[in-house]
Image: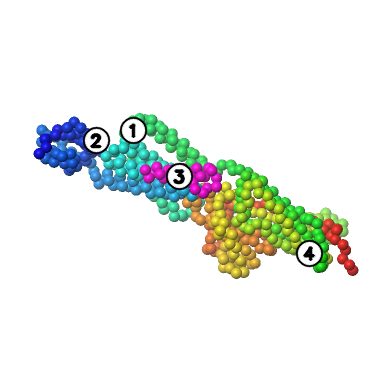
Amino acid sequence: MSSRPWVVVEAPDDRGLRRVTVGGRAAGSVWSLRELRRLLDRLGHPDVDVEDPASVCWHGEDSGTWPDRPVRRRATMAVMAAGLLVSGLLSALIGWPDASGALTFAQRIIGAGLVLAGVVQVAGAVLALDHWGRREFRASGAVVLLGVFIALATDGLLFLLWLEEKEVTPYLFAFVPLGCWAVWAFVLLIRAKVWKGLPHPGRFVAGFYATALLSAVSLAYSTLYQPATAPLRFSLNAEFGRARQDRSLPYIHIPVKLSVKNTGDVSVYVIVNDVSVYGRNARYSGNVSKEAFVRAWEDSFGDDGQGAEEAERHADGFSFRTLSSTRLYEPGEVLEAGQEDTFVHVFQVPREVSYDLIDVDVQFTYMRKDRGRIDVEQYQKPHQSWRHPRFACRVAVVDVDRCPADTLTYHGRVRHNNNLVNVTRAPLYVTAFWAPLGRPRYSISSFHFTGGRIDEAADKRELKKFGISTRHARAEVSVAELLRFIPAAPR
């Protein structure tokens, strides 16, 4: 039998844990009388009578005072660790797409910051076991507090972003409960003053609040406030070339030179584009009065509000006929910053053409790549209305009751470059229509194969957020000018 040691059991601390020394050396801490006996047994003193004053000295309280509430303590520890673990995984899940694939450096930094925040929260979840245990690591409480604050800031920011549109998303059922948990955990840790075990607790508190304030302002600024982006300058030109007589047929070939240049610093997605050539006919008259001139122009406007874009005193009754229609790019293509392309489109008209003017109208609609990303593989698959009428009708921009005829429909998922915004929004889709007759149309909304009408006001807001704009170029030439170098037809 070993000699009996001199055992000292200190008074319980604020958590009910009592420190034990054996033979003048620190042996550990215990929560209960049972743990004390186990500790002495591990040290080789199983026969110590804890009630014998000659062997055990009780400081402050006797052997019957054990204020620890193990069920409550372990439940708090489990909820704290679970909340930090789930919140850390959510932060990493949200931040990784931006950290690995964002198009701008600022968004990559935000994504990497969220991934790092997730790592800190997971570390806090591990150290929560120590903080509600024996606290062998002095800074465990501070790390847990830091992780909880990160969770509170992230969930609060997600909730503020969600309030902008109030759309139901799967992530809503994650960050709202986590936000409630973070409020509870933060209040609990602040009341417990978990930083007290640090060497310089006052400095930690001051540094914590200063860092928290700067981080919150920086993250909110970069996410909620969209800073001025690099300006986008776009050049679009069209001009007619010299007409040529066909060698064997009574037709003339008219070339149109088209140039597109992205002179800005931002690459763009091509949403839709169109090149349409029109022949104009007019009714000519002699000298007319001012009143007749204005009345003829007013009469050109129909019930749909569309009318003549120009007015002439000696010509009215304008009518236009589409002579040719084509595109420069396939929807979904990318026009890089500084890229310049030149195209020549040649169309044919009869030698004895009846038009007085021929004009070309170029429309180019694009989306800034620094504002969003398009699922190009999905978007570049056209759906023909004559082969897929059901699809074309169900994604009509204005009214599904008016199914577009002879139309190519392009439809694909579009995402914000900031994944914090994506997880608080319903899925968005970009839709574009192109037809040889009629102007291209496009839209961005959450509308997807479900029928009904699109909210046009919401559509305009989304178009602005994604930086979708349209550029036009127009050129016209008189038929007399085109035929100037063409020999007269034999009579």
Q: Secondary structure at mark 3?
A: helix
Compared across the picture, whether 172 is left or right of 328 comes to left
Circle nearer the N terminus (2, 4): 2
Q: Looking at the image, is 354 positioned above or below residue 269?
A: below
Provide the residue designation for mark 3.
Answer: 114
Residue 266: tell me if it is visible.
yes
Structural crowding at the residue carrying mark 4, measured as other residues with C-alpha within 10 Å and reported as few (<14), some (14–19) or many (≥20)? some
Instruction: Please identify the quarter of the rendering in which residue 345 is found.
Output: bottom right
Q: Name the quarter where the N terminus is drawn.
A: top left
Q: Amino acid at mark 3?
A: Leu
Magenta residues (range): 99-123
> Colour scheme in the image?
rainbow
Q: Is residue 284 left or right of residue 91?
A: right
Please tell me which of labels 1 and 2 falls first in the chain: 2
Mark 2 neighbour density, 10 Å: few (under 14) some (14–19) many (20 or more): few
How crowded is the residue under tag 1: few (<14 C-alpha within 10 Å), some, or many (20+)?
Answer: some
Residue tagged 2: 13
Q: Residues within 10 Å of mark 3 (few under 14, many from 20)?
A: many
Label 4 to label 1: alpha-carbon separation: 87 Å
Between disc 1 and disc 2, the foreground one is: 1
Q: Which residue carries the number 4 mark?
A: 349
